[in-house]
Amino acid sequence: MKKYKGIIFDFNGTLFFDTEQHEQAWRQYAKELCGRDVTDDEFRYCIHGRTNADILRYFLDDELTDAEIERHSEAKEEVYRRLCMKMSDKLHLADGAYELLDQLKTAGVRMAVATSSGRSNTQFYIKRFDMWRWFNQNTFIYSDGSIAGKPEPDIYLAAAEAIGVAPSDCIVFEDMPSGIGSAVAAGAGRIIAVASSLSHEFLGSIGGVDEVIDDYTDKEFIERLLEMVG
């Protein structure tokens, strides 16, 4: 069994199962902006895993200013966060994630997050889920405007650098095609897809995916994972 030195998690749809809330927010906001509905394929290939700047330019105009992008982004994210707060007993990390992160920290595994979320949502997650239990400001990599969005490799390269591990020695957890493509382009050693909203069959058909899981509750999987990074 190949040994790995680090783990990088995507966040939305991977550690936090919030795909439904993002889709509701984008459906509402795109309707207001463009007067049309968003298709399932657009969500799969043009929205999920991508930065708000890339999404807004897709819907509106490549010539949007930074100020316009910031205004539209925050308006959409306010809708999204309101929807999250209505999740009630579902407003928590994915099943088994707390226990896994604790085990990885205890084992001394180097970990990072590589998310396309912006600053305001990242602050929401850090506070709501106490993310500093496992990560810090250097290892929670988010879309601050300085890193090219997925499927470009930049964010996974930055996350690997933050934990001092070569991408080929990292295991990446992802849930969407754009993020998987980013991890592949970065040269990730192993990619585990999380079927939080897409099917096992579809995710397993994407090049570069080594394994597909539902969440983090499978004890056999967790034991194998700990062996791989042990």
Image (cartoon, grey):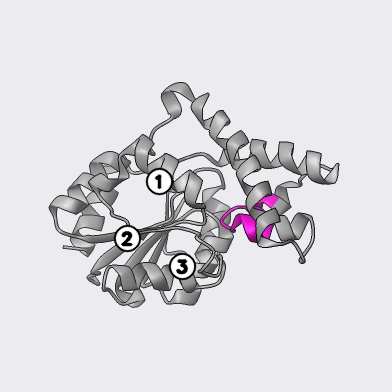
The structure residue drawn at horizontal position 38% and vertical position 62%, both measured from the top left corner, is 172
Neighbourhood count class around disc 1 (C-alpha, 10 Å): few under 14, some 14–19, many 20 upward: many
The disc labelled 2 sits on which kind of residue?
Thr
User: Residue 136, percent across and down?
Assistant: 28, 54
The disc labelled 1 sits on which kind of residue?
Leu
Main SS class of the magenta portion in the image: helix
Closer to viewer: mark 1 or mark 2: 2
Q: Is residue 200 above or below residue 18?
A: below
Q: Which of the marked residues, 1 or 2, is nearer the chain's N terminus?
A: 1
Name the element at disc 3: helix
Q: Which residues are magenta?
A: 43-55
Q: Where is the C terminus found, in terms of image quarters? A: bottom left
- Mark 2 — residue? 139
Cα gap from disc 1 to disc 2, whole angstroms = 15 Å
- Mark 3 — residue? 155
Q: Is residue 202 above or below residue 188?
A: above
Cα gap from disc 3 to disc 1, whole angstroms = 17 Å
- Mark 1 — residue? 15
